[in-house]
Image (cartoon, rainbow, N blue to C red):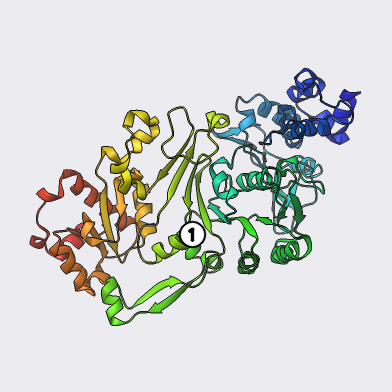
Amino acid sequence: MLLQLNLLHLPYYHQPSLPNSIILKLLTPPISSLPQSFPRTGSGRRASLSACHSLGSPVFSLPEDELDVELGRLLALLPEEMRRRVSDHPELHQLMEVVMDLGRKPLARFPSGDFVISEFPITVQDIEHATAQVGDFAIDNRAGISRTLHRISAIRNRKGAIIGLTCRVGRAISGSAKLLQDLVQDGASLLLIGPPGVGKTTIIREIARMLANDYKKRVMIVDTSNEIGGDGDIPHAGIGSARRMQVPNADMQHKVLIEAVENHMPQVIVIDEIGTKLEAMAASTIAQRGIQLVATAHGVTIENLIMNPSLEMLVGGVQSVTLGDEEASRRGVQKTVLERKGPSTFSSGVEIISKTQLRIHRSLEATVDAILSGRLPNVEVRKMKSQEQENSPKGPVINSSPNGNVMYEDAVEQADDQNDQNVSPSQLPNDVVEDSWEHKVPLRLFCYGILEATVMQGVKQLKMNDAALQLTDNISEAHALLALQAKLKKNPRIQAAAKSHDIPIYVTKTSSLEQVTKAIQALVDDHENGLKDSVSMDKIKLSEKIDALEVV
């Protein structure tokens, strides 16, 4: 009887299309692995979920068969030969997406790279076979498979016919938000930013489940394209007891946000992909009502949001302020500066560097103020070793023991506090020792007229260690000054201050990434060779140094 109920969970047209390996798993459910108190009446799916709740497990985890079934439902969109080649791939359970373009060979994308799953190009019949088995495509050309997290995105021609499909695998990964557990528990409103594909949606799905199940809060998810709660009217089990409101089309997301607050009394609102000014305004309105917000936005760093006119409201907005002569002289800046306009919608910001590394801004307002004033913000870099994820400590720790898998580093304060720490390098994990500033003298750089984001991008292009270079707003502590030629000429006080402290000056004609990168390489080389032994900067004409850094 249990076997029949398990099979009834799949629509009829999926059953004969499942790969053989997955069908075998369906035919042999792991009954022996179930708890003794496990209720064996009802469907296999409901029984397995109720068992997880009855055991009081703090972390949600789908059984292996459920993961295989969901993956099988995605693979059912493919013809038999393609399914077989994907199923035989050693990285089957790390499959990221399948790409099908008319007239081209289909590709399966794995962490190791793209894999051709058929030597024959995709035909119209292949695409029609796939689209017939998914839900209706919305105005954003996205569809899904009911009660799964998979996303099917369509590419259309000028006549509206579908000529390409991107079949993206969706998974509910337990523990993916463990690095943010302390912030979530404190009730902080979190803004997660990162480029596509780094796992923003996976993290906020786990945060929603954590808030609803572990902290017993009323959580409402505003699901723009059904990526958080999955396709269909019944949400995916990965969100726990959190509720989900679907959005008819993306243009109405801001209205659904306000509706969720006014009609359903949530304590937490979870939003995926804030992208318009109206949505940013709605989020700001919700924050003023004392509701905890968790949201994502596309970007790489906080600077991207500050420079984005549609989303700058999320970090408080930016305005131009004219200073008096005395204040401008005291700050050592021009009379017109940029300042934060108002309070930030979110209390904390998270930059997702990779699936196992996050950059935390505990005070988003302080970060924005620092960036606008040209200073380096206080940042925590948190890392997780995914292979030992289950044994990681729950609370935040600094420089955990070699057996721990969560390592928090402070990208700014660690340099100042390193003399107060009595932790020897042998007690630190290997990857922390390699990046530790105790083994090298960081180059402190004072920038004038050049954005911090440009400098950090240059550092990344040179593949330098983040600990090798620090930005400082105190020129007396700097080892070198990097300035824009036009700005430097208008401020002789900066030149005089650099000369009085015997600080070498590196200038560029433009603030382009190429010139800034070249300047960083030059000053790093000089720093490694010893700035004290280098030629005195007052013996070198400013024009000669500009030519030295000029792009050929």
- In this view, the residue in front, 114 or 46, is 46
Left of 164 or right of it: where is 441?
A: left
Residue 150 in view in this figure: no
Q: Position of residue 5 (x, y in %)?
A: 89, 29
The C terminus sits in image quarter: bottom left
Q: Position of residue 135 (x, y in %)?
A: 80, 47
The N terminus sits in image quarter: top right
Residue positioned 67% across, 39% down in the render: 172
Q: Residue furthest left?
A: 539
Name the residue tied to disc 1.
364
Residue positioned 53% across, 42% down in the render: 179
Q: Residue furthest right?
A: 1
Left of 464 or right of it: where is 498?
A: left
* Quarter of the image where one finds residue 30: top right
Tag 1: amino acid: Leu
Q: Position of residue 404 (x, y in %)?
A: 48, 31
Mark 1: give few (<14), some (14-19) or many (20+) Cα within 10 Å: many
- Identify whether 138 is placed above or below 494: above
Left of 382 or right of it: where is 14?
A: right
Left of 226 or right of it: where is 462?
A: left
Q: Residue furthest bottom?
A: 324
Q: Position of residue 233 (x, y in %)?
A: 82, 49
* Quarter of the image where one finds residue 27: top right
- Identify whether 317 is placed above or below 52: below
Element type at marker 1? helix
* Quarter of the image where one finds residue 6: top right
